[in-house]
Structure formats: C-alpha cells, structure tokens
Amino acid sequence: MLGLALVTLISAAAIFAPWIAPHDPSAANFLAARQPPAWNPDGSLTYLLGTDQLGQDLFSRIVYGARVSLLVGFLGALTAVSLGVTLGLLAGWFGGWTDRIISSFANLLLAVPYLVLVIVIATVLGRSLVNVILLFGVTSSPVFIRFARGEALRLKQLAFVEAARGLGAGSRVIIPRHLLPNIVGPLATLATFEVSAMIFYEAGLGFLGLSVPPEVPSWGNMLSLGRRFLTTHPWMAVFPGLAIAITTLGINLLGDWLRDAIDPRSQEGG
C-alpha cells in the first residue's frame, strides 16, 4: 500500500504539474538565486524548497521533473517489454536459426557493460527524451528476451499447447493466445523493477549531461547542477536526490507486492 501510494502521488504530481507548481520551472529570478528552503530563517514561503543558482524554483522543477523520469521509466520499460517479449517468444517457439540470431543479438548487448554501452550510445544519439527512451528500451530488452525465450521453451512442451497444435492452431494463434497470457504475471513483476531501474539510469545520464537538454527540468539535470554547490547550498542536490529515492522506493515496494501476489511462495523463507 505504501508503494502504491507513493507511485500514485508522484504520478499525480507529474500529470497535474501545471496546477501544482507555483512557478514556471524555467523562469529565472537572479534576485532570488540560491535562496534556502522556506523553513530556513533566511527562506521564504514563495520558494518552498528554495531556488537554484539561477533563481529557479526547486519545487516547481522537481514536480515537472517527475514527468521526464516517469516517461523514461514507463515508456522505456514498455519498449523493452514489447521488443524483448516478441523476440524471446519467437526464439523459443521456432528455435533453429531464428533462435540463434535473436540469442546472438541479446548476448551481444549483454557482452558490453551496461553503463558503458548506454553512455556510448547516448553520446552518439544526442540529448533528447525520445532518444533516451529508445536507448533504454533497446539496451534493456535482453532481460526480457531471455525470460520470454525460456518460458516459450517450457510452455511449448506442455499438454495444452500440444492440444492446440492437434486442433490445427498455428503459430499466429498459439503465441498470442496460449504462450503470452501464461507469462503475463511474472512479466509484470519484472517490468515493474525495470521501471525503477530506468528512472535511476536516467538520473545517472542526466548527472553526466547525456540525458535530456539542460533547459528541460529533470532530476538528473538538477543533480548535475546542484553538485557544484553541495557544500555551500546542499538543498540544490538533496531534494532532487530525495525525489529519485522516494520514487524508486515506491516502485520497488509495488514490485515486491506484485511478486508476492502472483507467487505466494516467494514470501516463504529460503
């Protein structure tokens, strides 16, 4: 319930950002630069969480930054699931050269350290929200390719699939109607954890200056700018970091609940 509440709260903030944020996230006010949070003696209720070096309202930027993180997390995971499950089911069902080609593609991506691969591709593609989503979707697909392939190899040996074959059903019927529905449960759990990971990775790319353009409010960009003032004005980096931590915590708690709901045996020790 806590995880669901946190995810719902962050999602609502992202959707209703124009009505929640008290200021334009890109509007600079140099007269209010580096202003501390409102509870600080030198702070002001006008800027609840303080301002950055340009006088931009941190609270407004964090609220709008939720849009970038959630879009990257959910759309990136959706891309990875769609690509990975499709290729994995095809590889496991048909086998032969189809399996060899798809497995080689997955192994090639897994052979390179993930962080290095992401940084190199992000540098080549440039800074764009669409590029980041596609980047995470493609580079994370091997996880789902291997999962779907293994499940397809297991399921196609079972009696209900053999019965469907005996009744004359072809691959176009068996794969979407018999194989896919039987992997939805564990797939949902795996995808949930992947959303959390992608939000964290996007923040890391933003910290390195390889995510969305600097004028777009994102938690990673805010961390990158705030680290320069960590010893003198720590709130510039602390609050974006807390937003990332709370969001990933909520999604991970929700993923744990999904795992336990789908497979009650996961709650047992051992």
Image (cartoon, rainbow, N blue to C red):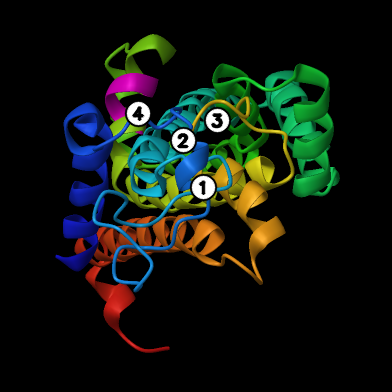
Q: CA distance from mark 4 to mark 1?
A: 15 Å
Q: CA distance from mark 3 to mark 4?
A: 39 Å
The first of marks 4 and 2 along the sequence is 4
Which amino acid type is shown beneath numbered disc 3?
Gly
Q: Which residue, as the protein is rendered here, is positioned at the far bottom?
A: 269
Residue position marked by numbered label 3 in the rendering: 84
Whether label 3 touches label 2, CB < 8 Å: no
> Of tags 4 and 1, which is closer to the observer?
1
Occupied quadrant, residue 116: top right
Residue 125 appears in the rendering: yes
Whether label 3 touches label 4, CB < 8 Å: no
Which amino acid type is shown beneath numbered disc 1?
Ala
Residue position marked by numbered label 2 in the rendering: 29
Residue occupying the point 41% across, 40% down? 61
Residue 170 appears in the rendering: no
The first of marks 4 and 1 along the sequence is 4
* Quadrant for the N terminus in the image: bottom left
> Of tags 4 and 2, which is closer to the observer?
2
Residue occupying the point 64% across, 66% down? 230
Residue position marked by numbered label 4 in the rendering: 24
Q: Position of residue 26 (x, y in %)?
A: 46, 28
120 relative position to 103: left or right: right
Q: CA distance from mark 3 to mark 1?
A: 46 Å
Residue range highlighted in magenta: 175-179
Q: CA distance from mark 1 to mark 2?
A: 7 Å
Q: Is residue 90 above or below residue 197?
A: above
Q: Is residue 95 above or below residue 59?
A: above
